[in-house]
Amino acid sequence: MTTPWVFCGPDRLPVPRADAFEPPARLARAEDLGWAVECALADPVAAPRLHRLARGAASVVITIPDASRPCPSPTVLEQLLGGLNRAGVPDTAISVLIGCGLHATTTAPERDRLAGVAVRDRVEVCDAQGIESKTRDLGETSRGAPVRIDERIVAAGLAITVGVVEPHLYAGFSGGVKGVAIGCAGQETIAWTHRPAFVSEPGVTLGALDDNPFQETLREIAARTPLGWAVNLVMNERGEPAAVAAGDPAEVQASLARAHSRAWLRPVDGPFDVIVAGVHEPKSDNLYQASRAATYIGLAARPALAEGGLLVLCADLSKGAGEGPGERNFFDVLMAASSPTELVARGLREPLGPGGQRSFVVARVLERFRIGVVGAADPSVLTPLEHLGVAAFDSVDAAVAAAEERLGRSARVLAVADAMATVVRGS
């Protein structure tokens, strides 16, 4: 029998004390990604083939994720450039934008890694960052969201987005139009769509695309841009591409979400006193990203964790709270809160700034549960959050022992190997 384990950045931590174990989905790697992308481009979902769509376009902008999501963008970009060239669009009319949202901008070496040196040598590669990049005002959505999008997207004849489909707390699933509607949006758009009152609306739910106000707003934002095509991928627990589809952004996202939902969304025989949640790289390198695992577990419609239970995040936090403006403000807002309940009430009453929505949802988790962190490169980074119920532990065993001392009995423990892509819910 396999000893239960969880990811902790690039490593794996054994959890022999676990009473139950949810392993990764173990999605098979696509043997030849270049061929898989070529096949996806040749058989698009609910859209014309790229050479037809791009024919006559004076300029094309392709968006790719930043380092917060593992994505084999270089291979996808090379295939897209080839397809665009065959449609008569020269390299000089093509550019690549790295959708940073409110995350930190990238360095030149990071851009080379994200887009690939071969692509960088052919086309312009630069950042779209919600504070630093110039945006254009495209009005408001039907719900009143201000639409501010990077001006290079707006000016393009055609926009194509490359993204990763995986569970997402607000959008239901990532991918689809999100690479443009958020990744290349201005801070006004990101702040409005991520404000606590909006992400708390009924229907804004992890794992749900239909009747989801957040997802609907993103699609309405994207409809005001020249976004016409997407290449979306599914990654496995080893950071390898497992599936790829191309075509209409919303339909591509929905098709991949339907195909993999059972692997990602799992009922378990709860409640558990302790859930040990593994977080793999790159989301393990800062608290802002790693805290997603806590919200996926703690904010489920039927949490698998008992009231007052301990949620243990296993993450190396090599970059502390995070380096971008959103990540820094997220941590500052948490530090300044007198209690989780006070922060939740304030978030519903007033803006919390860039990244503040994440401090809000983490506070919602902390109203019901405690959060522990194992594996932090510098555990002292968590000290300012101890008053909220966040603690650092030297090991998983130490975290479980602390829970058992609090309970006065043996704890029932669940280990979730990959808590970023395995969303457990009480049955």
Image (cartoon, rainbow, N blue to C red):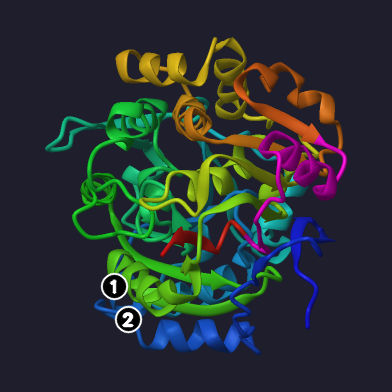
Q: Quadrant of the C terminus?
A: bottom left
102 displayed left or right of 381: left
- Compared with 328, 162 (above or below) is below
- Which residue occupies the extreme left position in the image? 142
Residue toward you, 422 or 307: 307
At mark 1, the secondary structure is helix
> Crowding at label 1, few (<14), some or many (≥20) Cα neighbours within 10 Å?
some
Q: Disc 1 designates what residue? A: 53
- Compared with 26, 417 (above or below) is above
Q: Is residue 288 magenta?
A: no
Instruction: Please indicate, yes or no, whether residue 64 appears anywhere in the rendered image.
Output: yes
Label 2 is placed on what type of residue?
Answer: Arg
Residue toward you, 112 or 287: 287
Indicate the position of residue 159 as horizontal and vertical percent values.
37, 57
The residue shown at (23%, 32%) is 145
344 displayed left or right of 70: left
Q: Is residue 399 magenta?
A: yes
Instruction: Please indicate, yes or no, whether residue 61 appears anywhere in the rendered image.
Output: no
Indicate the position of residue 380 as horizontal and vertical percent values.
83, 24
The residue shown at (65%, 72%) is 23
* Residue stretch in magenta: 393-418
- Compared with 294, 419 (above or below) is below
Label 1 is placed on what type of residue?
Answer: Leu
Q: Are marks 2 and 1 in contact (CB under 8 Å)?
A: yes
Indicate the quadrant where residue 191 lies.
Answer: top left
370 displayed left or right of 108: left
Q: Say which mark, if any, is on residue 49.
A: 2
At mark 2, the secondary structure is loop
Indicate the quadrant where residue 299 lies.
Answer: top left
Q: Say which mark, if any, is on residue 306.
A: none
Q: CA distance from mark 2 to mark 1?
A: 6 Å
> Crowding at label 2, few (<14), some or many (≥20) Cα neighbours within 10 Å?
some
